[in-house]
Image (cartoon, rainbow, N blue to C red):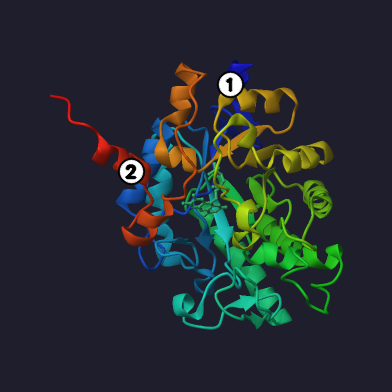
């Protein structure tokens, strides 16, 4: 069974060397315009050398009013193309594969960050919003659909191996899907069909821009993890619709910054029983679609993942925090399947991204400080 993890996996026209994916992770290493540089290239080279079969980039803004955290990657104008090309070349040089995760933050940002009132499906206060956003007009919706398509075309031109739409974690696509953040009265709000319309239009425009042969995938929220919110039953229907339209893979996540202990980045993954917290959702979606399903969230040991693969709960296994702590974790698992990821899921890795120009594992530093000198 371990062999199944380390054998090639075909995702459309891409041959992944194994079933492990670096889930999209904002690294905070780009300049103010969103251009990546040497630091991110070196980081991605390290991840490929560490054995991961596919990297999904940090969330990448398709328009400047969709920025959020500092150092986020951008794909909103052509001047970024040389820097993006250099990044994809670095990954390909090492034999790796790289998808670009496209996002617009919608209401989950602030006018301080973007210099204008944030846009969202509805002008409501929501715990994860920086302030009350402006309700998007239908012209705003059309222009954002185009921004996603233009971003996808740029990603293809820059040499990325495919796209991942960010349809989770409380960002714009998720804001449209959720009844908690979408209270529109027009064709884009109300029942699930209407709330899915923006996502389906984005998918269609992106597909049109990149063509049938280019991998287009999604990180889809399976639930808001909040009362009266988007549910897994809704997610299954959306996933089936995307599947019928030709989506190439679905990564299953859940929650947002508003979901408290059930956020996308849960803490306290201390025992195997705490691991793989999105699997009940992934299983439901996997049963309902033909496209490969990736699961993310709290994957820490190969023994747990083996069970998931045996049960056909997912095809691909995505990790974020464990690879910040141990960029060579996949190689390590290949050599020692009993190793448990040493990530303690403390979320301390965000801080250096915010303050020091790039994410890093702070536990390593604490350990370094406390190490007793050996004489
Ligand atoms: C520092 C950091 C940055 C993240 N940035 C993104 C991102 O850009 N896009 C995204 O979809 N998820 C992002 N996430 C969430 C992860 O991809 C993942 O869904 C979550 O951390 C749970 O997986 P894990 O337990 O393997 O860390 C980020 C997580 C961390 C810790």
Q: Is residue 41 left or right of residue 7?
A: left
Coordinates of residue 277 in the picture (x, y in percent): 66, 41
Where does label 1 land, which residue?
Answer: 7
Nearer to us in this view, 342 or 172: 342
Vertical side of 137 occupied by 362: above or below:
above
Circle 1 Cα neighbour tier, 10 Å, few/some/many (<14 / 14–19 / ≥20): few
Which residue appears at 50% of the width and 27% of the height?
340
Q: In the rendered image, which quarter contains the C terminus?
A: top left
Q: Residue furthest left?
A: 375
Which residue appears at 30% of the width and 50% of the height?
38
Which residue appears at 51% of the width and 19% of the height?
338
Vertical side of 38 occupied by 66: above or below:
below
Where does label 2 land, which residue?
Answer: 42
Distance between mark 1 and mark 2 Cα atoms? 26 Å
Question: Quadrant of residue 179 in the image?
Answer: bottom right
Which residue appears at 37% of the width and 59% of the height?
30
Nearer to us in this view, 198 or 70: 70
């Amino acid at each position: 069974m371990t062999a199944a993890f380390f054998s090639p996996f075909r995702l459309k026209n891409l041959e992944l060397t194994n079933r492990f994916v670096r889930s999209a992770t904002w690294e905070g290493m780009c300049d103010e315009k969103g251009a990546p540089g040497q630091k991110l290239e070196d980081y991605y080279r390290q991840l490929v050398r560490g054995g991961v079969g596919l990297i999904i980039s940090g969330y990448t803004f398709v328009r400047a009013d969709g920025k959020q955290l500092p150092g986020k990657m951008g794909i909103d104008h052509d001047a970024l193309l040389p820097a993006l090309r250099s990044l994809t070349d670095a990954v390909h040089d090492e034999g790796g594969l790289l998808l670009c995760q496209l996002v617009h933050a919608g209401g989950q940002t602030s006018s301080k960050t973007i210099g204008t009132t944030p846009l969202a499906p509805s002008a409501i206060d929501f715990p994860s919003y920086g302030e009350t956003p402006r309700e998007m007009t239908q012209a705003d919706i059309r222009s954002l659909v185009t921004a996603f398509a233009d971003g996808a075309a740029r990603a293809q031109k820059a040499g990325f191996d495919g796209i991942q739409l960010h349809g989770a974690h409380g960002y714009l696509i998720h804001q449209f899907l959720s009844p908690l953040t979408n209270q529109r009265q027009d064709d884009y709000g109300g029942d699930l069909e209407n709330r899915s319309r923006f996502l389906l239009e984005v998918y269609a425009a992106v597909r049109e821009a990149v063509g049938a042969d280019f991998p287009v995938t999604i990180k889809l929220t399976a639930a808001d993890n909040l009362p009266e919110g988007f549910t897994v039953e809704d997610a299954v229907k959306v996933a089936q619709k995307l599947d019928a339209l030709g989506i190439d893979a679905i990564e299953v996540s859940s929650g947002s910054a508003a979901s408290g202990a059930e956020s996308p980045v849960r803490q306290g993954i201390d025992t195997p029983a705490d691991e793989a917290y999105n699997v009940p959702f992934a299983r439901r979606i996997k049963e309902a679609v033909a496209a490969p399903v990736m699961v993310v969230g709290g994957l820490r040991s190969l023994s747990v993942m083996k069970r998931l693969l045996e049960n056909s709960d997912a095809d691909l296994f995505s990790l974020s925090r464990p690879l910040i702590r141990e960029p060579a974790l996949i190689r390590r698992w290949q050599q020692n399947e009993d190793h448990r990821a040493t990530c303690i899921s403390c979320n301390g890795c965000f801080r250096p991204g915010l303050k020091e120009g790039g994410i890093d594992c702070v536990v390593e530093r604490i350990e370094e400080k406390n190490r007793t000198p050996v004489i």
